[in-house]
């Protein structure tokens, strides 16, 4: 099969070319017929030719990835284009259907533009459209990777309180049965009035802060006291009593309640009181866990600026705190957090969700740099007509040879699969869209990213 000028005329940029111009393309191009699955261009290989797709379809896997693809169906033009600065293929190109291609080597670009002058502006337009599409796909991939990162962090944050609530709820169900049985025994032996007195006395317990040594000593004292009264669970119960705020004096005071409590009734009384304390403790744990979950939901809603307009008045301190809430579990593993916020920090106008992506990337990088041990420093202050946010860490620092490239597209100091995927290039772009700037200072033990944003007129600048 041989291609004809009419085959080329179906491609929009070629449709009004003369017969002679179309024949020039056919004469200087290489025909190729490919079955589905054939590799037309290897990722990372030298970019050398323009691809005219006359039949079928090709798939461009950006960065050789199956997760980020672009499809080009016939009739279309792809591959290397005149005036492009691309030196290597940024995608692996594979046919997805039986395809007919005409390939024109870059050595023919200047003769082609001389022979067909109208092609120059048209191919430049195609190149611009393609760059816009690749940028859109890159941003989508970055956002998906960031979403995956945040999902993993939030899974950690939700798992602890949710598991605690589940355990406590199960303990409550079991303990309620113990409580009912113990109350029945005490009521039968001592009567309702003593039971009421015991409930009132129980309300006088108040938990007290104790050092580890003081707590251990008190548990020993209470354990001995309970054991002396024939309590078979003395040492299991001792910690419960100490946690509730009991002392030996408080336990001895049980004997002085109105109507008195005989010594032989004390085991039943102690069993009922211990079960009551345990039920209250479990109910408190459920309450605290659900409060934590509620606080996380509130932080996430604020973090994403859900149900808010793209441009809004932004409280930078709240944005930083909401971001820190998402990384809470990482901060519990040996990292000290220091916050220094100007209490009179003004709000600024901008896209809060995008700025929170900036804080997410910088805070995550700082935490990772310290490898589980160090100090994370967050500062937010007003300097002149700007708000300055500084995120610092006590990690090993960024080598001097990397500082100049740290904001370059696709540059990373992390291993594949690590980090948010957002990238410092995109961080820089978001900051610049808010008419601000970002600066790095780094030495061993002190790395600081400083973001400066103007307070007035910070609406994001869109291309």
Image (cartoon, rainbow, N blue to C red):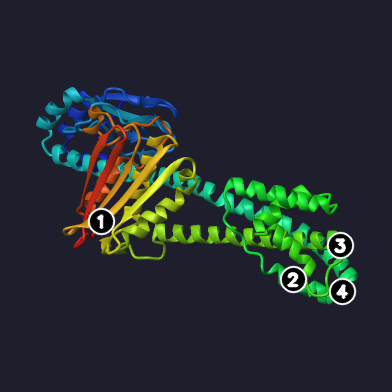
Mark sitting earlier along the chain (3/4): 4
Residues at badges 2 and 3 in contact (C-beta under 8 Å)?
A: no
What residue is at 29 percent from the left and 37 percent from the top? Answer: 446
Element type at mark 1: strand
**In this figure, what is the number of numbered marks?**
4
The local crowd at label 1, few if under 14, some if 14 to 19, many if 20 or more residues have their Cα within 10 Å, is: many
Element type at mark 3: helix
Residues at badges 3 and 4 in contact (C-beta under 8 Å)?
A: no
Q: With 57 as the anchor, is 233 left or right in this view?
A: right
Residue at image mark 3: 263
Q: With 166 as the anchor, is 211 left or right in this view?
A: left
What residue is at 73 percent from the left and 55 percent from the top? Answer: 171
Residue 358 in sight from this viewpoint: no
Residue at image mark 4: 191
Nearer the observer, 10 or 46: 46
Q: Hey, which quadrant is residue 194 in on the image? A: bottom right
Q: With 364 as the anchor, is 163 left or right in this view?
A: right
**374 w.r.t. 315: above or below:** above
Spot occupied by residue 148 in the image (x, y as percentages of width and height): 46, 44
Q: CA distance from mark 1 to mark 3?
A: 65 Å
Q: Nearer the viewer, mark 1 or mark 2?
A: 2
Give the residue at the far bottom of this rendering. Answer: 193
Label disc, if present, on residue 199 of the rendered structure? 2
Element type at mark 2: helix
Mark sitting earlier along the chain (1/3): 3
Spot occupied by residue 240 in the image (x, y as percentages of width and height): 70, 54
Mark sitting earlier along the chain (1/4): 4
């Amino acid at each position: 099969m041989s291609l004809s000028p009419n085959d080329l005329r179906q491609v929009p940029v070629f449709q009004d070319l003369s017969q002679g111009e179309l024949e020039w393309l056919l004469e200087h191009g290489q025909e190729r017929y490919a079955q589905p699955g054939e590799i037309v261009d290897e990722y990372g290989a030298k970019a050398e030719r323009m691809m005219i797709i006359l039949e079928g379809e090709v798939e461009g896997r950006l960065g050789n990835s199956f997760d980020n693809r672009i499809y080009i169906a016939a009739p279309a033009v792809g591959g290397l284009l005149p005036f492009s600065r691309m030196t290597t293929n940024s995608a692996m190109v594979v046919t997805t259907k039986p395809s007919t291609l005409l390939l024109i080597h870059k050595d023919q670009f200047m003769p082609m533009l001389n022979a067909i002058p109208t092609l120059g502006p048209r191919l430049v337009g195609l190149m611009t459209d393609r760059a816009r599409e690749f940028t859109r796909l890159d941003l989508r991939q970055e956002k998906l990777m960031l979403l995956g990162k945040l999902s993993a962090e939030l899974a950690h944050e939700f798992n602890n309180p949710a598991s605690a609530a589940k355990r406590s709820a199960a303990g409550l169900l079991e303990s309620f049965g113990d409580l009912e049985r113990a109350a029945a025994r005490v009521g039968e032996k001592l009567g309702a009035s003593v039971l009421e007195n015991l409930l009132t006395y129980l309300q006088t317990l108040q938990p007290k802060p104790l050092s580890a040594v003081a707590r251990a000593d008190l548990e020993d004292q209470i354990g001995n006291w309970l054991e002396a009264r024939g309590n078979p669970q003395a040492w299991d119960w001792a910690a419960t009593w100490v946690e509730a705020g009991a002392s030996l004096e408080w336990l001895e005071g049980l004997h002085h309640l109105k109507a008195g409590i005989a010594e032989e009734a004390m085991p039943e009384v102690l069993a009922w009181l211990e079960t009551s304390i345990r039920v209250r403790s479990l109910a408190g744990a459920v309450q605290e866990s659900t409060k934590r979950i509620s606080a996380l939901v509130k932080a996430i809603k604020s973090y994403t600026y859900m149900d808010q307009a793209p441009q809004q008045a932004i409280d930078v301190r709240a944005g930083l705190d909401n971001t820190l809430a998402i990384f809470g579990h990482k901060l519990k593993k040996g990292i000290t957090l220091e916050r220094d916020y100007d209490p009179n920090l003004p709000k600024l106008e901008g896209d809060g969700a995008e700025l929170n992506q900036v804080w997410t990337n910088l805070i995550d990088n700082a935490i990772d740099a310290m490898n589980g041990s160090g100090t994370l420093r967050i500062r937010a202050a007003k300097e002149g007509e700007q708000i300055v946010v500084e995120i610092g860490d006590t990690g090993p620092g960024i080598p001097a040879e990397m500082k100049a490239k740290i904001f370059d597209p696709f540059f990373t100091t992390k291993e594949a699969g690590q980090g948010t995927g957002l990238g410092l290039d995109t961080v820089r772009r978001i900051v610049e869209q808010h008419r601000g700037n970002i600066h790095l200072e780094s030495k061993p033990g002190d790395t600081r990213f400083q973001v400066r944003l103007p307070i007035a007129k910070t609406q994001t600048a869109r291309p």
